[in-house]
Each structure stands twice: as C-alpha cells, then as structure tokens.
Amino acid sequence: MKRILLITVIALIGFSASARRKPIEERPQDIITYTYDVTSNHSVSSTILGLEYSYEAKLADRWTLISRAGLVPTGFEMSSGSYFSTFEGTLGLGVSLEARWYSNIAKRAEYGRCTYNNSSDFISMRIRANTNGDLEISFTPAYGIRRSFGRLWFHEATFGPKIGVCGDDMFIAPHIQYRIGIAF
C-alpha cells in the first residue's frame, strides 16, 4: 500500500513539473488564457454581506476602472452577554469607483499561468459613497489578489486602510474583504 501511494505521489509531482515546462502554444486554450493585458467585463459579485453589479473598463495595458453599485455592508456590531452573543450587519445602498493596476499579469502570462478574467495581483484606489441613515464617503487604497475558476467565476481578496467621513466624523478603519462573483 505504501509503495502504491509513493508511486502515485511521484507520478503526480512529475506530471505537474512537466506540465509547467510546456510552452504556451502547446497548452489547451479552451478555458485558460495567457494574455499580457487586462480585459473589460461586467460582473455580479457578493461579499459576506451585500450584492453588487460592476463594470470593469480597460484603460491601458494593466489599468482598469471599475464602477460598482448595489447593496453594500455599512456596519457590523457584535455584543455578548452572560447567556448570549449576537452579531448584526447592516446594509445600505452604495456606489464606488475604483482604479486598479494589475501588477503581475504579464509575469503570470510569461510563466504560463492563467490570466483569464484578469487573474492577477493588483493595487487599487477606491472611492465609495454609501447610505445607512447618514451619508458615508470613504477612500481605500488596497492590495488584492484576484483569481478565476471555471469560465465565468472569480474570487478576490483585498486589504488596506479605509479612510472616510460619516456625518461630521472622520474615521480610519481596516479594510479586509473577500468577494466571489460571476463575470460575463
């Protein structure tokens, strides 16, 4: 049993290594693409709370501008007592404009990795306005990772500081977000 497992592991490692060495021209192009620049697309995506429609427009080789609108998370509240704990999230209407620079899309294409649906690491600057009683306007510089799976699906994670104004108060808060969506 141990020999069969060892032979299987060695075969998988060898197959994986040989697949990485194939030139781009010899690889199947049905789902995976290897382009050196970004593409425009429409998408519908969801975070833990919220649902947004977005359009990502290509500006240059590695630059895009994303406009989003939809229901966005506007606050979280956790409380606990001696017998219970509660978690509440609130939603509001939101619109945002985000400039994105895909930092390693050319390198991913050179190494033969998937760049379909703008699969790459990125740096972004987002301005968002949302409502939940008061108007909140925020600016978020962030670093993120976007990857595609299948023909239409993608997921991305971003993090950075969020600087904003809500009513007369200014705030700085951490921004950590995971988004999953479908692009068309």
Image (tube, helix red, strand yellow):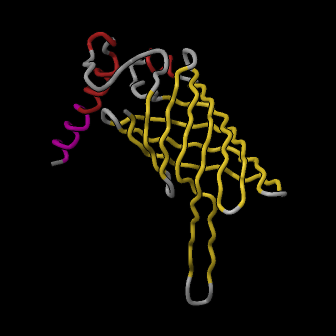
Nearest to the observer: residue 22 or residue 37: 37
Residue at x-position 46% and y-position 22%: 39
x, y percentage for residue 8?
A: 20, 37
Nearest to the observer: residue 117 or residue 107: 117
Residue at x-position 57% and y-position 37%: 144
Q: Quadrant of residue 155?
A: top left
Q: Quadrant of residue 99?
A: top right
Q: Quadrant of the C terminus?
A: top left
Residue at x-position 60% and y-position 25%: 101
Question: In the orientation shown, which residue stands out farthest toward the bottom?
Answer: 83
Q: Main secondary structure of the magenta part?
A: helix
Q: In screen coordinates, is 157 left or right of 23?
A: right
Nearest to the observer: residue 64 or residue 4: 64
Residue at x-position 56% and y-position 25%: 64
Question: In the orientation shown, which residue stands out farthest toward the right?
Answer: 168
Q: In screen coordinates, is 83 left or right of 30?
A: right
Identify whether 131 is placed above or below 155. below
x, y percentage for residue 82?
A: 61, 89
x, y percentage for residue 81?
A: 62, 86
Q: Which residues are magenta?
A: 2-11
Q: Is residue 4 magenta?
A: yes
Q: Is residue 159 magenta?
A: no
